[in-house]
Amino acid sequence: MSAPQRFSGVLTPVITPFNEDLSPDSAKFIQQCRWMLSQNVGLSIFGTNSEANSLTVEEKLDLLDCLIDAGIDPLKLMPGTGCCALGDSVRMTAHAVKRGCGGVLMLPPFYYKGVSDEGLYRNFAEIIERVGSTDLRVYLYHIPPVAQVGLSHDLIERLVKAYPETVVGVKDSSGDWDNTEGMIKRGWDDFRVLAGSETFLLQNMRAGGAGCISATANVNPAAINTLYENWEAADADDQQAALDEIREVFQAFPMIPALKAASAHYSGVSSWATVRPPLVELTAAQSAELIANLKNRAFDMPGLAEAASA
């Protein structure tokens, strides 16, 4: 098996479906991922919007195996494997490599705050060394608004220099375009800078970035991918504005429950609205407002209902 190619394009932090008892619904997860692939986006499972840190390591390993055993191409998968416990990160990452995943998205250990670049470097280096595979491709996950532990440009550069064939990209969910652009301008060889929202997709592509990993790619994947593929088109700014309008509809509500409420509506499967505590689902009034706002913009999720019933 040849080494994985580096990711570019649009990836989705796939929302995780739950049964009534709050256990993961693997059958529905497989259906959802197949629909995402039909929309020409990659699968960044176990990301923030996947409620990944509300899942156990065992649950995530089982879901990963279910996807691959069901025929999902592992090279399309970028599972989140960064945990607070070093051993959990190693276990998750090693299993992803063993199953042939195209890469992993790695949070820093986020419980302790104010940690040094040296400490973070040692964490990532230890994981890489313990996994010990030339097939490992790490995409660092910078999301200080949530994790409260960020990744400095100097830290990233140190990791890239130490592991140039392993640390190959970053998802920047800082919400700070200057930070994202600064990463691109560092000019690390073939290093893939993925914006953390389609809000920055056009800017990212024009600056030399590689695409985005976005929450709303769960609900608007084809349109986001169309801009990625046609970012040099004459109407690219209009496409970006249209994406921003839909994003703003979802951002008016708690994002994960809103994504799930929309998925429940457009799939016709009400259980999609279920979230794990401490999150709570949208109220009936909120859901109605969300769907009304989407309908006012002629929004749809084509093929989702058919995928859900397959």
Image: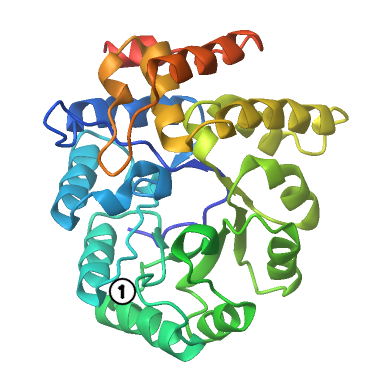
Locate residue 35, reporting x and y percent.
39, 24
Confirm whether residue 302 shows in the render: no
Crowding at label 1, few (<14), some or many (≥20) Cα neighbours within 10 Å? few
Confirm whether residue 126 shows in the render: yes
From the viewer's perspective, is residue 170 above or below residue 63? below
Location of the N terminus by quadrant is: bottom left
Q: Residue at x 45, y 73 (%)?
A: 166
Counting every numbered tag in the picture gives 1
Tell me if 163 is positioned left or right of 126 in this view.
Answer: right
Tell me if 295 is positioned left or right of 278 in this view.
Answer: right
From the viewer's perspective, is residue 204 above or below residue 252? below
Tell me if 187 is positioned left or right of 310 in this view.
Answer: right
Locate residue 268, reporting x and y percent.
34, 9
Locate residue 164, reporting x and y percent.
52, 78
Q: Which residue lies under the disc numbered 1? A: 133
Locate residue 11, reporting x and y percent.
50, 43
Outermost residue on the bottom side: it is 118
Q: Residue at x 29, y 13 (%)?
A: 269
Outermost residue on the right side: it is 234
Tell me if 220 is positioned left or right of 185 in this view.
Answer: left
Quarter holding residue 88: bottom left
Location of the C terminus by quadrant is: top left
From the viewer's perspective, is residue 257 above or below residue 87? above
The answer to which of 243 and 30 lies nearer the viewer is 243
Colouring rule applied to residues: rainbow
What secondary structure is found at the residue carrying circle 1? loop
| Residue type, numbered disc 1 | Ser
